[in-house]
Amino acid sequence: MSDPIVTICEHYHRDRSRLMDIVREVQARQGQVSPEAEAVIARELGCKPVEVQSTVSFYAFLSERPVGHIPIRLCNDVVDRMAGAAEVARAFERELGIPMGSVTGDGLFGLHWTPCIGMSDQAPAALIGDLPVTRLRPEDVPELVEILRLSKDPHAIPREVGDGNNAHPLVRSMVHNNIRRSGPVCLSPWPRGEAVHRAAAMDPREILETIGTSGLRGRGGAAFPTGMKWRFAAQAPGARKTVICNADEGEPGTFKDRVLLTEQAGMVVEGMIIAARAIGADEGILYLRGEYEYLRAFLESVLQEYRADGLLGSSIAGLGGFDFDIRIQMGAGAYVCGEETALISSCEGRRGDPRNKPPFPAQKGYLDRPTIVNNVETFCCATRIVLGGAEWFRSLGTESSPGTKLLSVSGDCERPGVYEFEFGTPLSSVLRAVQADDAQALLVGGPSGQFVQEAGFGRTIAFDDLGTAGAVVVFDHSRDLLEIVEQYMEFFCEESCGYCTPCRFGNEVILQIVHRLRTGWGKPEDLDLLRELGQVMRKASRCGLGQTSANPVLSTMDQFPHIYESQIARPRGFDLAAATSQAEALAGHPSRHLEKEGDHA
Amino acid sequence: MPEEVTLTIDGKKITAKIGQSILEAAEENGVYIPHLCALQELHSTGACRVCMVRIDGRYSASCTQPVSDGLQVEVESDELLEIRKMIVEMLFAEGNHFCPCCEKSGNCELQALAYRLGIDSVRFPYQFPQREVDAEHPDVFIDHNRCILCGRCVEASRNADHKTALEFIGRGKNKRLAVTGIVDLDRADKAVSVCPVGAILLKRQAFQVPLGQRRFDHEPIGAEVESRNPEVRTP
Ligand SMILES: Cc1cc2nc3c(=O)[nH]c(=O)nc-3n(C[C@H](O)[C@H](O)[C@H](O)COP(=O)(O)O)c2cc1C
Ligand code: SF4
Ligand code: SF4
Ligand code: FES
Ligand code: FES
């Protein structure tokens, strides 16, 4: 019998650039990518074992040590914690008899925390194997574990499947779309395939012109004009070009791309085909975050349908020379891979390290080819623009921000879910729609965006006011904002790629100082240090992660200064118990005088 | 396309060759921009961020930014000095740097830069991380305590030695250097000679050059560049 790892490598033609796929399959099959496996892979691909290790050790869903035959990954996002993730974790710990972050003795279960899995509107949520399990309650855990013990298969978990394509035979997940407000661009029916036929009949320059005049700007956060990006790639010399759809959706509190992929996948695919025609690309990649593995088979079937209809593959829509196909590249748990150059590294089978710009992807991207990377929603918009025309698109939204924006709303509100609003909508209207009447703060754009306080609820969703990739998290007056800031900083520490100094260490320092403040040990000079450090990170970090990761602190210091000042003002004596705890642990007994005198604080 | 371009650094006009980075162009013209990860003969990684400048108002790492005609580059300002200082302080707090007992002392670019920038204390909490000293190789020490993750050795091993004997593993604060196997690394490798700090050292070389006679003992880092008697043309 041949080594299964060799077979996997053969399947990918021993192509070093497909290392991500290879190690993901090994991980799925063996529950780990052991050093021995790394050595076999390296031999097969003709690279050094340390290169394989370099990739494996970067991604949270890949591990050199066993993570359990059935890894249970509980989402520890702020919203999930608000919804009771800690109690769910305790229930799992009790049932499995192991603490979080470990594997059962028989190797069957692993229990791990994971950042936002894109289910904030149905928190607390977890991934059991690849399967999302939502709205978890502690009381459900014993039965869940019992079934898993007997079946050893996450798919045996009985579940009421969700709405729409969540019930599709290739999906069958309990996830709900929670589409609360449809709109004319993304969340409404479209004539399948028509946009591709139109694009095939158009001159590429005409497509660039249409997208350009529509005023479409990227929906993934950076708001770069899409027409301009496509034009750069179209003009860049290169025999082969690539179109990449960024479905990494890692920003905590964002889940609208998940809904688009579930319900409007064809629109996304058509947008990619249109882009391919515009820039002259022959290869497309849909980069799907590892957390959305459960959608993969379904998305493959969507691609297959387009191929069967002659809308993907060679001579698309009957046009000779219009050749373009799409493959799905799975991620493996790394927020930074949403950054477009890190995403390209990941597609090439490497660590998700962002790259230096220039060169920009449009000049030199995937495998050094001119490449465009766009968000899922951006491609949906492109499809609709080809159908409805640039003028129509411009009639929606505002002058500077034409069109609509999908918002993923979660947190303290009655109607969490996905909303399609025209740009220019004030936050107050969003709050009314989601039924949140006790909002203390809104986090717009996720932790890399900004906190807004009540006085700012008249501000609007627009690129020249509150630009956002779409996450809106509502916090009511019962929430401790500083605690929330601390949790978001934990996220950034976990997710920094570690390439550059300000991000790798700056996030750690911020977390430590915020923790110090929260526990009453803050010093007045800490506030200045936080501010200065945050500014240095913003200016000097190498990629957008480090450039925005101080935002939870910077924006709350600006909007809610009292949450910091009150901590500094809090008088606090010397905590003798804390100071002697290490010595006590070493001595193996409590300090004598403490027993008598109690708490000195 | 013209071979040369003109740009200004702190108001002074300089000429540079197309393809050069701002950092290279500045150095050629006798302007020192503090830096830790960039090295003339290697591809710049842009990892340390010490070489930050402002180009037409935008913050940018000068080692990865190519020159182009008409750029206005700001190198000296209180704000940029503050950024550089903070980053160097971060590197000291993040690792374990006990200079008095380090063989690199006096030859160390990090230490020399701290002196040059006037850093006398560190504002950040020292982490005292638990890190290893790898002494397995017959000729080379790798002391992870002092590694600043600049990437020079990885870059040199990949693109100069054509070996990829070294790679980074892990991410965030767990990122560290890894060696493929000691057989891959040779004492004559470029990868062994480029470390700016005392993280990669040759064995049996300690104190061959006595303290007091080392590279930065008599001149601050950057003095070499500044002594290039630049032909700086003022507008
Ligand atoms: C840390 C980080 C994470 C990101 N994550 C995503 C993401 O999940 N999805 C996305 O579309 N863009 C993400 N981006 C933005 C991308 O870098 C890029 O700007 C975007 O994909 C371009 O597409 P667009 O122009 O259509 O928005 C991220 C950026 C950073 C810095
Ligand atoms: S590497 Fe440099 S900074 Fe670090 S201890 Fe040695 S001399 Fe000091
Ligand atoms: S060992 Fe030296 S050269 Fe290599 S990354 Fe660390 S500090 Fe840089
Ligand atoms: S490590 Fe990612 S921005 Fe620096
Ligand atoms: S020298 Fe430019 S980033 Fe290190």
Image (cartoon, helix red, strand yellow):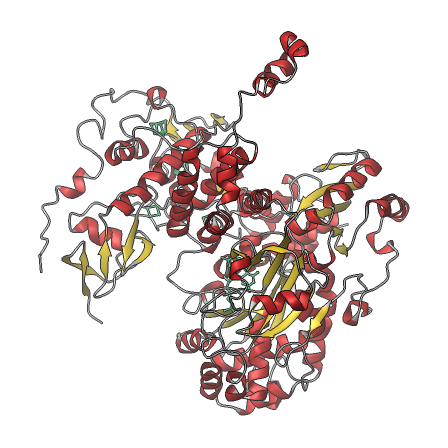
Residue placed at 44% from the left, 26% from the top? Answer: B138
- Residue A130 appears at what percent x and percent y? 74, 55
Residue placed at 53% from the left, 49% from the top? Answer: A47
Q: Pick out the residue farthest to the bottom.
A: A201
Q: In the picture shown, does residue B56 fall above or below A191?
A: above
Q: In the picture shown, does residue A380 fall above or below A16?
A: below
Q: Pick out the residue farthest to the top.
A: A592
Counting every numbered tag in the picture gives 0
Relative depth, front residue between A501 and A57: A501
Q: Viewed as shown, does residue B202 lie left or right of A255?
A: left
- Residue A441 appears at what percent x and percent y? 58, 54
Q: Quadrant of residue A135?
A: bottom right
Residue placed at 58% from the left, 88% from the top? Answer: A388
Residue placed at 57% from the left, 78% from the top? Answer: A381
Q: Viewed as shown, does residue A261 lie left or right of A356?
A: right
Q: Viewed as shown, does residue B72 lie left or right of A355?
A: left
Quadrant in the picture for the N terminus of chain B: bottom left
Q: Is residue A385 visible?
A: yes
Q: Is residue A248 visible?
A: no
- Residue A459 appears at what percent x and percent y? 51, 66
Relative depth, front residue between A87 and B142: A87
- Residue A211 appears at what percent x and percent y? 49, 82
Quadrant in the picture for the C terminus of chain B: bottom left
Relative depth, front residue between A267 and A25: A267
Q: Viewed as shown, does residue A29 lie left or right of A498?
A: right
Q: In the picture shown, does residue B7 fall above or below A83?
A: below
